[in-house]
Amino acid sequence: MSEPYLDVETPLKGARQEIIRAMSSLNMEPESLEDVAEEDIYLSQRDRWASHAMEHLEAAFELLESVLTPPMASASISVDPVEGFRI
């Protein structure tokens, strides 16, 4: 699977591509991560491909942030495996 790619000429096109990559990651055969703690209950903490999908979603959010207009331009979008999406 590819690494997230933020250096694109058209941020919205890049965000779309990152979302497609995240969807592709979620369609891979499950693969457990090593050294998972008992308290790690979220799929992105336990599965390699779910974790990889989150990386692509974070890249998509960064690209979307780059095209937001004020007052949202100062907003920060983040993805936390425990708390989920935050603006």
Image (cartoon, rainbow, N blue to C red):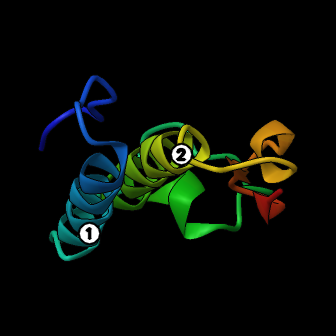
Q: Mark 2 points at which residue?
A: 67
Query: Can you say whether 70 is above or below 27 in the image?
Result: above
Task: Residue type at mark 2: give it.
Answer: Val
Residue 22 picture quarter: bottom left
Q: Residue at (24%, 31%) from the top-left corner?
A: 8
Q: Nearer the viewer, residue 39 or 12?
A: 12
Q: Position of residue 75 (x, y in %)?
A: 83, 45
Q: Which of marks 1 and 2 is in front?
A: 2
Residue 32, percent from left and from top:
36, 56
Which label sits on residue 30?
1
Name the residue located 55 percent from the left edge and 37 percent from the top edge: 66
Q: In this view, does 84 lie above or below 70?
A: below
Viewer-nearest residue: 75 or 2: 75
Can you tell which quarter of the image residue 39 is in?
bottom right
82 relative position to 1: left or right: right
Q: Residues within 10 Å of mark 1 (few under 14, many from 20)?
A: few
Query: Taking 62 as reference, is 4 left or right?
Result: left
> Which residue lies at the image location 37% right of the left edge and 57% below the top edge?
53
Report helix, strand or loop for mark 1: loop
Element type at marker 2?
loop
Q: Pick the residue in front: 85 or 39.
A: 85
On screen, 42 above or below 33? Answer: below
In the depicted structure, whether residue 52 falls above or below residue 23: above
Q: In the orientation shown, which residue stands out farthest toward the top? A: 7
Identified by mark 1, the residue type is Pro
